[in-house]
Image (cartoon, grey):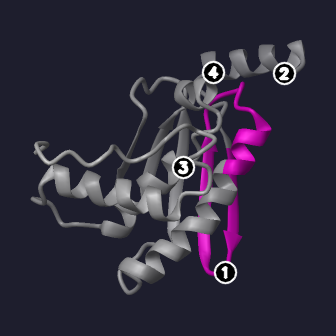
Amino acid sequence: MTILKVILIAIAAMLGFSSADIVVYTSAGYKLTLVNDDINFQQDTRQRCIDTFFATMPAMCNRFNNAACSRDVRVTIDPKYDAVAYASGNAIVISANWLRNNPQDTDVMTHECMHIVQSYPGGAPGWLVEGIADYARWKFGRNNLAANWRLPDFDRNQH
């Protein structure tokens, strides 16, 4: 990134304008609006996130909740968000810092997309909601091995 671009982004931010890079991608009836608020977001990580969305979202919708599944999802890469990620409605927020420090962990997208597929009205136990999303990541994930992610080993005493 050039120094001029950084200066222009800083001036725009001071004037209240967003420096977000917003791109809409569509494929096979699915729409991904990617809002990138991180000027340092790596292109290869971005492309893996996009590829992961279009590979896993349709597969999970078809398998679990095809009739009610949202096919229009907004994903924001947020440098101010300090946890990993969350989904709400048809929107996902992913920590830019998480992706910067864990660039192979693009299946965080798979996990969060499963929450959109679930689209529970509320009241479902957290362990069930998260457990199903982890199962979907395990089943449909594309890069879990490289991200060093796996389901925990079964423990008869865990609850």
Which marked residue is nearer to the observer: mark 3 or mark 1? 3
Q: Is residue 40 left or right of residue 124?
A: right
Which marked residue is nearer to the observer: mark 2 or mark 4? 2
Please name the residue that numbered disc 2 is placed on. 5
Q: Position of residue 131 (x, y in %)?
A: 27, 54
Secondary structure of the residue carrying numbered label 2 = helix
- Disc 1 and disc 4: Cα gap in Å? 36 Å
Mark 2 is on which residue type? Lys
- Disc 2 and disc 3: Cα gap in Å? 31 Å
Res 86 visible:
yes
Q: Which one is earlier in the sequence, the residue at label 2 or at label 4?
A: 2
- Disc 3 and disc 4: Cα gap in Å? 31 Å
Please name the residue that numbered disc 4 is placed on. 13
Mark 3 is on which residue type? Asp
Secondary structure of the residue carrying numbered label 4 = helix
Secondary structure of the residue carrying numbered label 3 = loop
Q: Is residue 104 left or right of residue 121?
A: right
Please name the residue that numbered disc 3 is placed on. 107
Contact flag, marks 3 and 1 (Cβ < 8 Å)? no
Contact flag, marks 3 and 4 (Cβ < 8 Å)? no
User: Which image quarter: residue 18?
Assistant: top right
- Viewer-proximal residue, 22 or 70? 70
Q: Position of residue 74 (x, y in %)?
A: 52, 55
Q: Which one is earlier in the sequence, the residue at label 3 or at label 1?
A: 1
Mark 4 is on which residue type? Ala
Name which residue lies at 70% across and 15% down.
10
Contact flag, marks 1 and 4 (Cβ < 8 Å)? no
Does residue 52 sit above or below 78 in this rendering?
Answer: below
- What residue range appears in magenta? 22-48
Is disc 1 surrounded by few (<14), some (14 to 19) or many (20+) residues within 10 Å? few
